[in-house]
Image (tube, grey):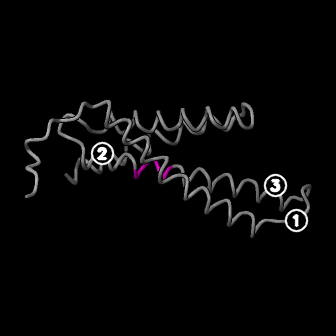
């Protein structure tokens, strides 16, 4: 017999923030691996050439786009399947949570860079947009 969904207790909003952050990372990791694999195959050459500097900018832009896609997907999940008390705010918080986790791991691995700020300029707004569209599609 199938369970009646209306009998399930409503999860608190903070749990949806955690679900969204995990979804963002779950979408981001494979996309990041794909971008890394493509970059490794396409952009090889002398490190001091102007083409190499352009390649670094292209690769960096690709990583930011895939982060935005992952954040959008996680925000959409929160907005679409969250209860009525969950929406854009929790989706944006999921984006900020995942950006914080990514920034900490990057800082520990490679040190502090200016690029870490871009995580916070991209992930929360992209997740909020996903959450807004998700709530409209409930």
> Residue 4 in the image: x percent, y percent?
8, 49
Say which of marks 2 and 1 sits in front: 1
Secondary element at image label 1:
loop
Report the Cα–Cα distance between label 2 and label 1: 43 Å
Q: Is residue 126 left or right of residue 55?
A: left
Residue 53: numbered disc: 3
Tell me the residue at 88%/65% (across/down).
45
Closer to the chain start, of discs 2 and 1, is: 1
> Residue 37 in the image: x percent, y percent?
68, 64
Q: Which residues are magenta?
A: 68-73
Residue annotated with mark 2 = 132
Q: Residues within 10 Å of mark 1 (few under 14, many from 20)?
A: few
Report the Cα–Cα distance between label 2 and label 3: 37 Å
Q: Quadrant of the N terminus?
A: bottom left
Report the Cα–Cα distance between label 3 and label 1: 11 Å
User: Is 71 included in the stretch rendered in magenta?
Assistant: yes
Secondary element at image label 3:
helix
Q: Is residue 136 left or right of residue 100?
A: left
Say which of marks 3 and 1 sits in front: 1
Closer to the chain start, of discs 2 and 3, is: 3
Closer to the chain start, of discs 3 and 1, is: 1
**Closer-to-camera residue (75/20):** 20
Residue annotated with mark 1 = 45
**Closer-to-camera residue (136/35):** 35
* Helix, strand or loop: magenta stretch: helix
Residue 10: numbered disc: none
Secondary element at image label 2:
helix
Q: Is residue 92 left or right of residue 83?
A: right
Tell me the residue at 36%/39% (across/down).
91
- Position of 89 relative to 81 (above/below): above
Q: Residue furthest front?
A: 1
> Residue 74 in the image: x percent, y percent?
39, 48
């Amino acid at each position: 017999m199938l369970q009646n969904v209306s009998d399930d207790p409503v999860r608190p909003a903070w749990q949806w923030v955690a679900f969204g952050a995990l979804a963002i990372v779950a979408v981001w990791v494979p996309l990041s691996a794909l971008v890394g694999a493509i970059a490794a195959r396409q952009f090889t050459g002398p490190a001091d050439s102007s083409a190499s500097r352009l390649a670094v900018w292209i690769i960096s832009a690709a990583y930011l786009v895939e982060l935005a896609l992952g954040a959008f997907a996680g925000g959409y999940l929160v907005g679409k399947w969250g209860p009525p008390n969950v929406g854009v705010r929790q989706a944006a918080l999921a984006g900020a949570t995942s950006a914080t986790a990514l920034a900490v791991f990057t800082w520990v691995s490679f040190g502090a860079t200016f690029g870490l700020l871009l995580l916070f300029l991209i992930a929360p707004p992209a997740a909020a947009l996903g959450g807004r569209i998700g709530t409209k599609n409930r």
